[in-house]
Amino acid sequence: MRHFLTLKDYTKEEILEILALGLEIKHEVKAKVFKPRLAHQTLAMIFEKSSTRTRVSFEVGMFQLGGHALFLSNRDIHLGRGEPVKDTARVISSMCDMVMIRTYEHSKLEEFASHSKVPVINGLSDSYHPVQLLADYMTMMECGKDINPVVAYVGDGNNMTHSWLMLAAKLGFELRVATPKGYECDPLIVIDAMELAQESGAKITITNDPKEAVVGASVVTTDTWISMGQEDEKTQRINDFKGYIVDEALMALAREDAIFLHCLPAYREVEVSEAVLEGKQSLILEEAENRLHAQKGLMVWLDKHR
């Protein structure tokens, strides 16, 4: 049995296999063909952090695969508050076929998975957001930007950045990360990525200069500067991130055919300009839809590898 907590746990071949399966299922759905690959199975969705795309994509995905998704907010269950995580994990995994958790502490995910009898999927933690990277790379594949890509990530050294580091290190492409001083990635995750990059041939650059990162890039991506739980830091962060907005001037440094990605929600004229977000290079809506298809590929793959 396999869990999906971080891309670090997967080989290049396995990641591409999951994505190929997701694309196959996507093509079927576009042709109105719905195969009940997970018929009568139940996905428990545990949300300690709310999300539009995560809930809709997993719930719709499970329905289209012939199964059922069960929404559980932190008001519905006692995960980590009054009941040990291991008890919640053992009970839910005895009744459901798969569990998706969107939470704060990555350690809670690891603890839950260690006691679960069924596959556990990371729907987002403070350390990683691997399902989003499946959707991002699927979007790159569909427009040919997976061929010798140069990806520039501009913004906060957060869970999205960590996941880009792992994806690049596993698949062997070039990634340039630009963050303000004081907002760099977790150094232990960077060390892991650099070690993996030596095996895959990935080229990873860490800088504090967004222009250096974006010059000649084929993919430019960013994320919100103020993640859930950081609202009290909003004024300070906006000040510290001056010069890191992905606007038309910054995008002009990338390749002429470069694409722009953002996992959403996006705060317009903060981390990205309205012109870029709504411009012809932006694939944010295709990227958002691919959460549905990539995650269906993932759930079917996990079911096959119990």
Image (cartoon, grey):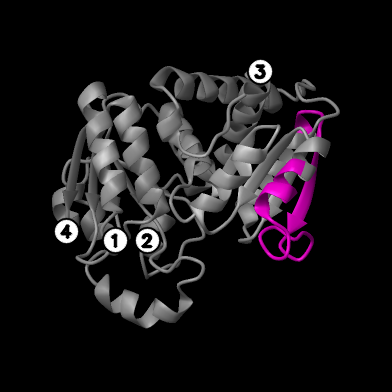
Asked if disc 4 and disc 3 are in contact, CB closer than 8 Å, the reply is no
- Identify the magenta region: 64-90
Q: Amino acid at mark 1?
A: Asp
Identify residue type, mark 2: Ala
Q: Quadrant of residue 30?
A: top right
Residue 247 is marked as: 1
Marks 1 & 2, CB-CB < 8 Å contact: yes
Give the residue pinned by disc 3.
304
Above or below: residue 2 compared with residue 132 = above
Q: Give the distance between the C-alpha atoms of the residues marked 4 and 3, in whole angstroms.
A: 43 Å
Instruction: Point out the frontmost of discs 4 and 3.
Output: 3
The residue labelled by disc 2 is 275
Q: Residue at x 71, y 45 (%)?
A: 89
For the residues bearing labels 4 and 1, Cβ distance under 8 angstroms? no
Earlier in the chain: of badge 4 and badge 1, it is 4
Q: Quadrant of the N terminus?
A: top right
**Quadrant of residue 211 in the image?**
bottom left
Q: Amino acid at mark 4?
A: Asn
Disc on the earlier residue, 2 or 3: 2
Taking 14 as reference, is 153 above or below it?
A: below
Q: Residue under label 4, please give it.
A: 208
Given residues 116 and 148, the one toward you in this image is 116
